[in-house]
Image (cartoon, rainbow, N blue to C red):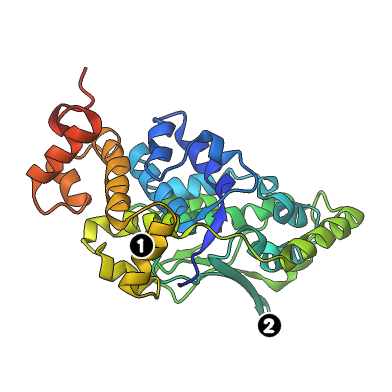
Amino acid sequence: MSNVSTVFAMSARKIANAVAPRANTGRLLRSVSLDRDALEDSSLRIPYADMMMLSELAARMTRDSAFGLHVGEAVDHKEYGVVGYSVTSSATLGQALRSLVRYLPIWTNVGTFRLDTEGSVAHFQWEYLDPSLPEPRHDCEMSMATVARFNRLTADSSWAPREVWFRHKKPRDTSEHSRIFRAPVRFGMQANAVLLDTALLDLPLKNAKSFSHSAITAIAEQLLARTPDVVGFSQSVLSFIRQRLSYGEFGVETLARHFGVSRRTYQRQLQQEGSSHRNLVQQARRELSRHLLLDAGMTATEAAHALGYAEHSVFHRAFQRWHGVPPGTFGRS
């Protein structure tokens, strides 16, 4: 079975908090089988794809085309536990960036940061390792905006990057990118990266604490050496089904091939966890259906297509069975 990229469920808290003033957070979380209690569990890990999907759903739900940027610019680095504290206690900006490169795998194995220097320019790059992940735009912009916040941690917060690069295509409105990064932002590039003057790596951080940093990194090294927790097979399958519903690519053969097992082994592993392919498809459709109709503003026909139904009548019957009312009248007073 292929390795599934995971992250602490607490990471989704910043998305939920950003949505809360404007929309129904509970429905958003339930669309990926989460609730508020799960976000407070310091040991729970979830498929990273679920968090990426949350950010995309939240952007549509709040009608905020710069949702990822807005979440990232408000992030408190301390929310990332020992990883965040290794950053905020660093002596210099360079040490903070290198701490993030070193200790991010404690938090998630979805990708890697890399810091390279070429003469007077330093490249701080972010790369996703799993090609099967859903659309990454808001998640990627969230990560890069979080990195951009490092200028607020330094003694001189007036500096700005030389450039910011994104691999994804240019959005229609880039005014928030310009405001947040205070630098030229380029899209369709070969990497997700922040380019800055090498000399800035020596900038001291305002809250540098050498003793604390040593103690924190000692703990971080111990955590780094541990085998990361994994999510259950059925949870991984459910996450992948959610990603593929609208494309119609969620059959048994497709899923077995993705997880690198035979059809028989795939079905047996689900059965061992008290589940089945059919039940997981129904769960994914049921959980997303409520969100699509009430929060995404889709019609019943559009929701049926998004959930992978070839016939609207089949969706209509399934929806009434799940929620007790037909999709056309759902949510009406």
Looking at the image, which is closer to me, 176 or 237?
237
Q: Is residue 148 above or below residue 32?
A: below
Residue shown at the point (37%, 54%) measured from the top left: 238
- Label 1: which secondary element: loop
Q: CA distance from mark 1 to mark 2?
A: 29 Å
Looking at numbered disc 1 in the image, what kind of residue is underneath it?
Answer: Lys
Task: Check disc 2: other Cα within 10 Å, few if <14, some if 14-19, many if 20+.
Answer: few
Q: Is residue 177 above or below residue 75?
A: below
* Residue underneath mark 1: 170
Q: Which mark is residue 129?
A: none
Q: Which mark is residue 119?
A: 2
Relative image position of residue 152 (x, y in whole percent): 69, 49
Q: Quick one: label 1 or label 2, which is nearer the N terminus?
A: 2
Residue shown at the point (58%, 43%) measured from the top left: 74
- Label 2: which secondary element: loop
Residue shown at the point (68%, 78%) measured from the top left: 120
Q: Is residue 63 above or below residue 172?
A: above
Task: Check disc 1: other Cα within 10 Å, few if <14, some if 14-19, many if 20+.
Answer: few
Relative image position of residue 278 (x, y in whole percent): 27, 54
Which residue is at the far right? 211
Tell me the quarter of the image containing the C terminus.
Answer: top left
Q: Locate residue 320: give its quadrant.
A: top left
Q: Is residue 253 left or right of residue 10?
A: left
Looking at numbered disc 2 in the image, what kind of residue is underneath it?
Answer: Gly
The answer, for residue 93, to whether it is visible in the render is yes
Q: Is residue 24 left or right of residue 250?
A: right
Residue shown at the point (30%, 50%) measured from the top left: 279
